Image (cartoon, helix red, strand yellow):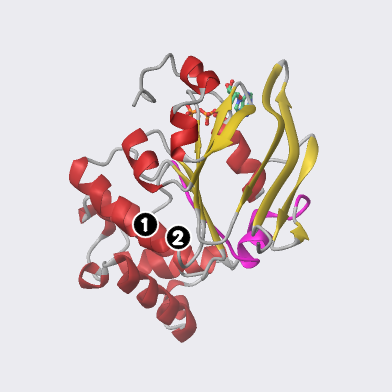
Amino acid sequence: MTEPILKVEGISKSFGAVQASKDVSLDLRMGEIHALIGPNGAGKSTLIAQITGGLVPDRGRVVFGGQDVTGLSTAARARLGMGRTFQISALAMEYTVLQNAVLGALGQRGGVFRFFRPVMKDAALLDAARAALAQVGLSDVAQVRTAELSHGQRRQLEVAVALTLRPRAFLMDEPMAGLGADGTQVLTKFLDELRAQAPILLVEHDMDAVFALADRISVLVYGEVIATGTVDQIRTNSLVREAYLGEEIAP
Ligand SMILES: Nc1ncnc2c1ncn2[C@@H]1O[C@H](COP(=O)(O)OP(=O)(O)OP(=O)(O)O)[C@@H](O)[C@H]1O
């Protein structure tokens, strides 16, 4: 088996008396969607922040592409190919779709945005942005103001921004949040295809999407991974059913 692209090894993180991550270990393998689920406040966002570099763990390490990245900045991790999308939109609503994709490409490279015009003439950035928009199906709206996009299209644009870096893996924090049934369906199909290009660690509350997409699921409860397994293994796991009170997870 090839080495996992991402390994989280024994990560712990406390905020005062709250232990948000308790000795968390998990990995992300090539070609897979690994979903991270858990009740509100279980520590999913805190874990993602430690993987992407926004928070420093108290203990443990993050290995990406065989390299220990625990001490690296978010931008340095992005340059190594760690792509991500956010729970809260980081898009500039007044800019066009293409401008957002270009600025995203620049930002993810750790570039500093000083003058708009030179940036918009940077052929490499423009090429990367256009290719990413084409891949998510937004080429037709490249010149449209981002504010005019539907919620689902904005989610696609966020994925496009992450794609500009040609990531080796994706971390996605609740990409389905706020999407209607149609938007969820479009994004589910898109993520299904995307995993072949780069594996995805997916934090998601929408259980239908998780069950449709995940090759493996890890369940986080009070900062701890209580189970990792296939959809069937997780559905029938008694600890998991207890944590969810049997509701969302019930077959
Ligand atoms: N910066 C912080 N300071 C103090 N406590 C924090 C901080 N960030 C998170 N926490 C606490 O850590 C725990 C885990 O929070 P986190 O946001 O990671 O959970 P989550 O699983 O992502 O929740 P949700 O599903 O609601 O997004 C919670 O008890 C939260 O209150």
Q: Which residue is mark 2?
A: 195
Query: Is residue 173 left or right of 68 when viewed as pictured?
Result: left
C-alpha span from label 1 to label 2 = 6 Å
**Above or below, comparing residue 2 to residue 173 in the picture:** below
Check disc 2: other Cα within 10 Å, few if <14, some if 14-19, many if 20+.
Answer: some
Disc 2 marks a residue whose amino acid type is Arg
Which of the 4 image quarters holds residue 66?
Answer: bottom right
Considering depth in this image, is 123 or 80 the residue closer to the camera? Answer: 80
**Residue 248 percent across, percent down from the top left:** 36, 23
Q: Which residue is mark 1?
A: 192
Asked if one can make out residue 15 in the rendered structure from this viewpoint, the answer is: yes
Disc 1 marks a residue whose amino acid type is Asp
On the rendered image, what quadrant is the C terminus found in? Answer: top left
Element on which disc 1 rests: helix
**Residue 176 percent across, percent down from the top left:** 34, 42
Considering depth in this image, is 152 or 141 the residue closer to the camera? Answer: 152
On the rendered image, what quadrant is the N terminus found in? Answer: bottom right
Considering depth in this image, is 144 or 166 the residue closer to the camera? Answer: 166
Instruction: Name which residue lies at 51% across and 19% down.
Output: 238
Check disc 1: other Cα within 10 Å, few if <14, some if 14-19, many if 20+.
Answer: some
Residue furthest right as drawn: 59
Ligand 1 - quadrant of the structure image: top right
Instruction: Name which residue lies at 70% across and 54% down.
Output: 73
Q: How many marks?
A: 2
**Above or below, comparing residue 136 to residue 147 in the picture:** below
Q: Which label number is shown at residue 19?
A: none
Magenta span contains residue 55: no
Element on which disc 2 rests: loop
Asked if marks 1 and 2 touch (Cβ < 8 Å), the reply is: yes
**Residue 98 percent across, percent down from the top left:** 33, 70
